[in-house]
Amino acid sequence: MKLPQTEAPSSDEARPRVSRDDVRRLFPILLLVLLAAAFAFTSSRFLQFNNLMIVAQQAVVLLVAALGMTFVIIAGSIDLSVGAIVAISALLAARTAGDLGAFAVVPACLMGLLCGLVNGLVVAKGKVPSFIVTLGTMVVYRGIVLYFTRGAPVSIEDETFLNIYSGRSFSVPHSALITIGLIVVTAIVLNLTVFGREVRAIGGGERIAFLTGIKVERVKIAIFGLVGLLCGMAGLLQAARSMAATAQLGEGLELDAIAAVVVGGTPLTGGVGSIQGTILGALIITILSNGMNIVGLDPYFQNIVKGLVLVLSVFVTIDRKKIGIIK
């Protein structure tokens, strides 16, 4: 008795196909590898250990702020005041480092938390769009820094403070180790807690989240408080690295933080996103800046390249099926 013969799958059918979702998911990794390979081919200095540690130090402030921004964007909101919160927290750290030493981290983080909670309360209780609220508080917080500094830098001379937050152990920056700890904590909060699921639910549909029993206002306040707390830590690390707090510190950081989150694959429409994507996005932006400086690219041309990379990343990673209207 002959068994029925089955047709062998064609070579096209046997070959695994790469879907658009795979491209969107893998694009940040591919872009990071391509940039690193391009700069390594162009300059032998790029892959030297000292330069890689410099990249780690440069990425710290952006990455810490972007970790908080990830929660805000996943929830469907935006925060334009992160740069100003970093500046005001750095100022408080610089003013208190002489008396508190390493414990200046407490007032710096509390200041960031307070600024974030103010943003969250106005957004949640006042029913004002986060874009408008944080645009206004950005000006207010930056104005406070300018008022107290009068445009002059506030230097930090406490050795204990500088050694703990900007020193190195076995050639590894302490700030990078602190950032790794923050990455672990934020990843656990986003992926393994009820709060993380509530953040995603609000970004997916605020009205539906409310009807399912989620305390939307409370979660929104907590989100902005979290990003403020992380910006407080970022301000402390930036002040330690610069050995001073300046009125211009953190300018433009809000755009870089948003770019890091978006380049990492988190859409501005909210609902989805990941910490690992934000890490990739922050590294892409930092490596891009570091590499362009090493190869000697015109500083006035570097912003053009950054903008083109951002547009390309959004064009590739955006999921157009989840957007009803392109505004």
Image (cartoon, rainbow, N blue to C red):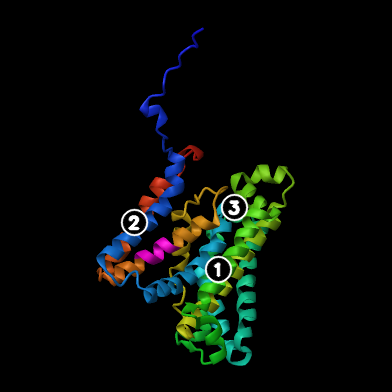
Q: Is residue 211 left or right of residue 268?
A: right
Q: Inspect this view and state whether residue 124 appears.
A: yes
What is the distance, in whole Å, between disc 2 and disc 3 at their CAs?
Answer: 31 Å
Calculate the distance from the C-alpha at mark 1 to the C-alpha at mark 2. Answer: 24 Å
The first of marks 2 and 3 along the sequence is: 2
Circles 1 and 2 in contact, beta carbons < 8 Å: no
Measure the alpha-carbon separation of dots 1 and 3.
23 Å
Identify the amino acid type marked 1. Answer: Ile
- Of residues 288 and 224, which is closer to you in this image? 288
Taking depth in this image into account, of 119 and 317 the one nearest to the observer is 317
Residue at (45%, 63%) from the top-left corner? Answer: 282
Q: Amino acid at mark 2?
A: Leu
Q: Give the answer, above or below, for where 86 lies relative to 284.
A: below
**Amino acid at the residue labelled 3:** Ala
Tell me where the magenta segment starts and ends, as one range. Answer: 283-288
Across and down, in percent, residue 90 comes to: 53, 79
Q: Which residue is mark 1?
A: 180
Q: Which mark is residue 34?
A: 2
Residue 298's tag is none
* Magenta stretch, overall SS: helix
Residue at the spot 40% in from the left edge and 61% down from the top edge: 284
Residue pictured at 55% horizontal, 68% vertical: 180
Residue 286 is covered by the magenta coloring: yes
Name the residue that disc number 3 marks: 75
Measured as percent of width and height from the top left, residue 169 is found at: 51, 81
Between residue 319 and residue 219, name the one nearer to us: 319
Residue closest to the far front: 1
Q: Is residue 18 left or right of residue 65?
A: left
Q: Is residue 185 above or below residue 168?
A: above
Tell me residue 82's x, y (percent): 52, 67
- Tell me the SS state at disc 2: helix
